[in-house]
Image (cartoon, rainbow, N blue to C red):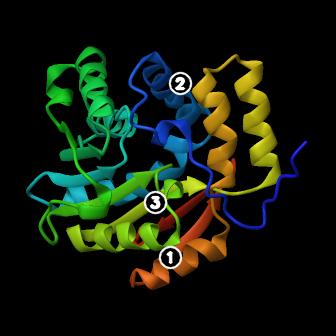
Amino acid sequence: MTMISFETRTDEDELMDDFSITDSRLTTALEQLRFVNRFLGGYGTTMAVLAPWLKAANKSSAAPIRILDLGTGIADFPEYIVRWADQQNPAVDLEIVAIDANPVTVEYANQALAKRLPDALKNRIRVEVADALNLPYDDDEFDVAMGAMFLHHFAEERATKIVKAMQRVSRGGVLINDLHRHPLAYFGIYTLTRLFQASEMMQNDGPISVLRGFRAQELDVIAQKAELPAFTVRWYWPFRWLLTTLKV
């Protein structure tokens, strides 16, 4: 059995990074990620900071708050956010542009949102193909740029470039939710994906994602190289990091 090292980030590719996979292996994994994000801290970690920030911004903004979501996958984070916004009193007025580099994923996300959301909420989300390494947006075009379980797909140099671009396009700040590289996280997701008979892609990619995840000091280095102003890195259960410049 190969020894597993948690000291440095692995450069092993995930199956989801292979854009030649366009069949049910991909779409099933995208659906299953929705449950991972709901029950393993994905939504909760992001909303711990984003929710109070949005409530405060909503009070002072006459225009809709604009969010850019990078590496959106099935766009379940935008779906969760617009549902949450609609349930607030008063409702939070926002628009989300959700991007992914994989055209098949974007098409599937649009289909999924059309089925799951009423038109009024679906119209608040625009899912489009775009490259996070070459964002086609103007400076300060958005209030917030966010990414969830996305940054770990990139080695340090490219991750830094992405974070710097996120800062460029967002006048309010950035919010990055990603994985803590830790043995308990690795063996936990390894066990859960097999116990609940997750798809082949999930069983393969879940543990690799953890090995591609971060230690706090690694996120510090990326943030410093990206010249983020006054950022914080906080740990959230279970084994999540939240890097942000949003102030709440």
Amino acid beneath label 3? Ile
| 181 left or right, relative to 220 | right
Mark 1 or 2 closer to N-term? Answer: 2
Q: Give the Cα distance between marks 3 and 2.
A: 21 Å
Does label 1 or label 3 sit earlier along the sequence? Answer: 3
Label count reads: 3
The answer to whether 230 is drawn above or below residue 57 in the figure is below
Residue located beneath label 1 in the image? 222
Report crowding for label 3: few under 14, some 14 to 19, many 20 or more residues within 10 A (C-alpha): many
- Relative side of 235 to 128, left or right: right
Q: Secondary structure at mark 1?
A: helix
Q: Of the residues tagged 3 and 2, which is closer to the observer?
A: 2
Identify the disc placed on residue 32. 2
Which of labels 1 and 3 is toward the front?
A: 1
Q: Residue at x 36, y 66 (%)?
A: 162
Q: Is residue 171 left or right of residue 38?
A: left
Compared across the picture, whether 229 is left or right of 28 comes to left
Residue 91 placement (x, y as % from top left) = 23, 40
Q: CA distance from mark 1 to mark 3?
A: 12 Å
